[in-house]
Amino acid sequence: MEFNFLPVNTYIVWDETGEAAVIDPGCFYPGETEQLAAFIRDNGLDVKLLLNTHLHFDHVFGNTFVEETYRVKAHANDLDMPWIKSMSRRLAVFGINYEGQVSPILPENVLREGDTVSFGNTTFHVLHVPGHSPGSIVFLNREQGCVFTGDVIFQGSYGRTDFPDGNHEALMTGIRTKLLTLPESTTVYPGHGPATDIKHEKIFY
């Protein structure tokens, strides 16, 4: 699903058990949270995980709704915590008044390189690929041959690094060593825009 004004890809991932994970809930406008909830309800899903690829505001607008509705706590890398703590100020730069609150990531929900998270019969392996943000992580499922990359990599492009805490060299290194080394058939589900695959993305690096 695409949510908010940027727009962000919000993913609901589930398997044959009916258990599910929500990745980067970007719900901002009225009705977007109901759209998300209706899909989960209509498909009989049981949300077990809330995962954030990074904590830029466009990817976390719906965090509090998901946490409170499904009684889960967000998982992310703690290096992006400053984005949560200063969310209102950062939004004000864009002329946006956001009345909601996004719950801080609790220590037990911190994900780092090499960690895994699971729901049902599905396991995601966590890869830390900083550069777009210090705490950018991607979620790799080797069994299904897919990876959820947030704003690390898009179809034919990559995340901007001109934010104060961005790092272009780190991003390029991470993409080349951690993503482009995956099997070429691996499907890439990015934070914005259409899906792609590793074979296609190797053309650009």
Image (tube, helix red, strand yellow):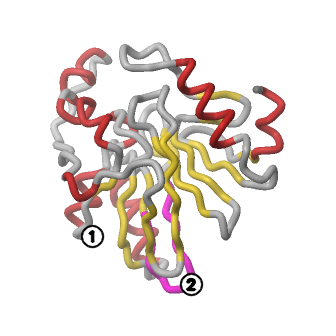
Indicate left or right for 80 with 169 as reference: left
* Position of residue 124 measured from the top left corner of the image (x, y, whole percent): 52, 63
The residue sitting at 49% across, 63% down in the picture is 12
Q: Residue at x 58, y 56 (%)?
A: 140
Q: Report how far apart the C-alphas of labels 2 and 1 lie in the structure.
A: 19 Å
**Residue 60 % position (x, y):** 33, 44
Given residues 106 and 18, the one toward you in this image is 106
Start-end of magenta stretch: 11-21
Q: Which residue is mark 2?
A: 16
Q: Residues within 10 Å of mark 1 (few under 14, many from 20)?
A: some
The residue that disc 1 covers is: 70
Mark 2 or mark 1: which comes first in sequence? 2
Q: Please determine whether, in this image, residue 70 is positioned above or below residue 54.
A: below
Which amino acid, by three-letter code, is at mark 1? Tyr
Q: The C terminus appears in which quarter of the rendering?
A: top right
Residue at 47%, 54% in the rendered image = 114
Q: Is residue 17 magenta?
A: yes
Which residue is located at x 27 percent, y 24 percent?
91
Callout 2: SS: loop
Left or right: 163 in relation to 109: right
Residue 4 against residue 138 in the figure, above or below: above
Q: Is residue 196 above or below residue 162?
A: below
Question: Which amino acid does the dot numbered 2 rest on?
Answer: Glu
